[in-house]
Amino acid sequence: MSRLTRKDMKRDEVLDWLGRTIEYMRRHARRLLGVAAAVVAVAAIAAAVVAYRGKQAERANGLLTEALAIYNAPIDAVNPTPDDSEDPSFADEETRKLRAKAKFEILRADFEGKGMGGIAAAYLGDLAADSGDYERAEALWREAMVDVFDTFLAGRLQLNLISLGKSQGRSDAVVEELRGLLNSESASLPADVLLYELAKALESLERRDEAASAYQRLLDEYDDSIHAPDARRRLDEI
């Protein structure tokens, strides 16, 4: 995704950009299921909607676009422009991360408990994961989910948490959480995605019969899912 600047976020262009971005995500959903990439790819979608809510919307949107410009800024060791508010660049990645973190922390503090605060927490979680602080990343992503539960971002954050749990050797807990989400009417992810993630988690635990049942249910109930081809392949291999 290209870098967002103040010019990109002009009021008369946001809704058109939002529609095009959602369509892109729909067509490329499989490729957007990574951990860090998931947050980066969709946080701005929620931002485009939330930015119009409340009396401080203009200020919140300004803080977010400044933070995003820094977060996505290029590295230019020869001629960095860290103080350029629209097109900054940085001498090294660590400096860029620290500056982005500071900006997101301001946004999070000033809009705590609101959509924009949740978006900031999501990015801060991404930065924490990048630095290897997975405990803090998980806490921030869970905080963010509370604020953005009714946006695309909530589902992507749930995928982050699922992937993180498996990578940290907590697949048993992931399985229980996924089963709970499948029985919940307020789950942030579609049922076919939950079933696919459940099957993969069960496979990682070598619970092959249960994994096969999850894959089969996905095929029986959601044969047009983007995960259906993988489910068929895995069933043949189990």
Image (spheres, rainbow, N blue to C red):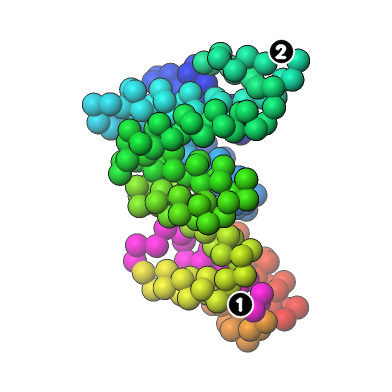
Q: Position of residue 160 (x, y in %)?
A: 54, 55
Along the line of sight, the residue nearer the viewer: 156 or 98: 98
Given the image, on which type of amino acid does mark 1 rest? Answer: Leu
Q: In front: mark 2 or mark 1?
A: 2
Tell me if I can see residue 97 in this picture.
yes
Cα–Cα gap, marks 2 and 1: 50 Å
Residue 86, above or below 223: above
Q: Which residue is mark 1?
A: 202
Residue 124, above or below 66: below
Q: Which residue is mark 2?
A: 79
Q: How many marks?
A: 2
The residues colored magenta run: 185-205
Q: Quadrant of residue 117?
A: top left
* Cβ–Cβ under 8 Å for marks 2 and 1: no
Q: Secondary structure at mark 1?
A: helix
Is 151 in the magenta? no
Q: Earlier in the sequence, mark 2 or mark 1?
A: 2
Q: Position of residue 143 (x, y in %)?
A: 39, 51
User: Which residue shows up at 52% across the image and 15% down it?
Assistant: 85
* Classed neighbour count for the residue bearing mark 1: other residues with Cα under 10 Å, few (<14), some (14–19), many (≥20): many
Q: Position of residue 56 (x, y in %)?
A: 28, 26
Q: Left or right? Give the position of 207 relative to 136.
A: right
User: Which residue shows up at 34% across the image and 23% down it?
Assistant: 59
